[in-house]
Amino acid sequence: MRKRGRALTSLAQGRLDHGPPIAVIDIGSNSVRLVIYEGLTRAPTPIFNEKVLAGLGRQVQSSGILALDAMDAAFEALRRFRALCDILQVRRIWAIATAACRDARNGRQFIAEAERICRTPITILSGKREAQLTAQGIVSGIYQPDGIVGDLGGGSLELVDVHGSRVSAGVTLPLGGLALQDLAGRSLKKAEKLVEDALDDLPMLAEGEGRTLYAVGGTWRALARLHMWQTGYPFHVMHNYRIGARDALEFSRLVHRVDTETLSKIEVVNAARRPLLAYAALVLEHLVRTIRPKEVVVSVLGVREGLLYSLLGARERARDPLITAAADLNVLRSRSPRHGEELIAWTDRFMASSGLEETADERRLRHAACLLGDIGWRAHPDYRGEQAMNIIAHGAFVAIDHPGRAYLALSVYFRHAGLSEGDLSPRLRELATTRMLDRARVLGAAMRVAYILTTGEGGVLPKTPLQVKRGRLVLRLPGFYGQLKSDRLARRLGQLARLVGREPAFEA
């Protein structure tokens, strides 16, 4: 008993054993941020995330130096961050600094004191390296990305082309919100001219037409949050939030042409971010007009996640982060993680024989849903579907869009709550296409068969295959497993059979 107590003290049961936690300290031109992660993995989970808007870059362009009060605010934040890392016994800290420290005459002096406080080396990223890491952040968290990545910080704008895992050489421009405000003397008209001069005839932008513009950076996220609330979007997860190009253009024009404080729903934006919204909107407007992308996709992953991704080996980078994250939750929350893995192969066989068409992306979503099928088992039986649905819909998943999240959540909801849409959230339902809703119901029905057959325990599904044979949906129960046949199992098999237009049957 004493040994078990020590184990509980050293590693909480809600944590995976990836070794000691790691941290990234990101000293940006507007914010100074600490993120502590559970470990260095393909799908790193933050344990702690905090930022301080120190505004280091607010007058670098005009004065050439970091302001004393901004440095003091940053030093205070860094002292707290170092103490937090000590409390959590962080062994590895990667610290980086971007445009403000890169451009200021006293940047090196600031970094020297920051290193003393943090007790770790701090790398001042070049503009090219910052662009590369930002693009790798997109590769790490967007499924099969294809387009132009734009990272709008306080001091600079990085632009880089990405296609799959291929990242081109990027460019950096002094168009960050604070830098633009400073250079233009707080004049939006002058800022507009600066943006036009910087972006006109930039060759790489012509390559983005008809593709995606990936928007990275806190002020662009604030802009997207405002758009989300103004349009009544039914889902408040920011990663992979998509805005059509025309809508993005019109919204950006609106934001930079009116008094920000008069905008509807402006209260959803942090007051400290509001003065920079117009500048962020101005840059976005000109990028959309110049590139002519099909859509703007917001990413919460950027330079920090790109840094961690760059530290992984080739084999780990090749893993699917959605499946990795779902497998982690399967281990943490399921009665039998083995069962979730077996459910993938069991439904593979069923789908292959069913005649239902399935794309490669739909297949990976189904695999993720199988891994998440039992994460709500500890909840009250009447609320398992609702609780699991909320955990999945709002979980920290990447490499999945919002309709994909809806599919995962709905599949597991149907598995627990039955196949009707009675208590289903209309907001979540709104995100799913008719095809996705149908596939979620089919998978939910299949999982209802699997879980009543196995009680969620591993080792049974490989011996009790489900497949369509000679026009019938057949569940094979050989030998010992024939004892598991029941009226309830027959009803669930019948429900699934009706969804795929077959007759149900058992086979001994």
Image (cartoon, helix red, strand yellow):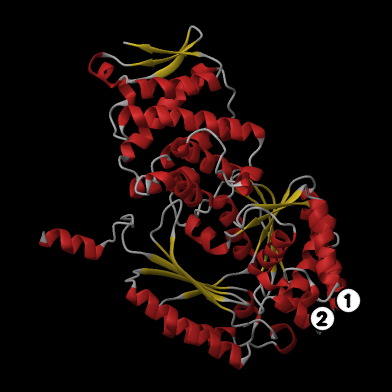
Which label's residue is closer to the chain start, 1 or 2?
2
Query: Could you say whether the residue bearing mark 1 is in a helix, strand or loop?
Result: helix
Q: Type of residue at label 1? A: Lys
Quarter of the image containing the C terminus? top left
Residue with the mark numbered 2: 184
Name the residue that disc number 1 marks.
189
Residue 243 place in picture, x, y as percent: 73, 53
Quadrant occupied by the N terminus? bottom left
Q: Quadrant of residue 375?
A: top left
Foreground residue among 265 and 120:
265
What residue do we see at 25% from left, 18% from top?
483
Residue at the image point whose x is 84% and y is 81% from the top:
187
Taking 264 as reference, is 38 left or right? Answer: left
Foreground tag (1 vs 2): 1
Q: Is residue 34 visible?
A: no
User: In percent of the image, x 44 and y 38: which residue is there?
Assistant: 416
**Along the line of sight, which residue is nearer the eye, 396 or 282?**
396
The relative height of residue 31 versus residue 402 in the rendered view (above or below) is below
Q: Which mark is residue 150?
A: none
Amino acid type at mark 2: Ala
Provide residue 320's location: percent of width, then percent of height.
Answer: 49, 43
Decide if residue 314 is on the left or right side of residue 180: left
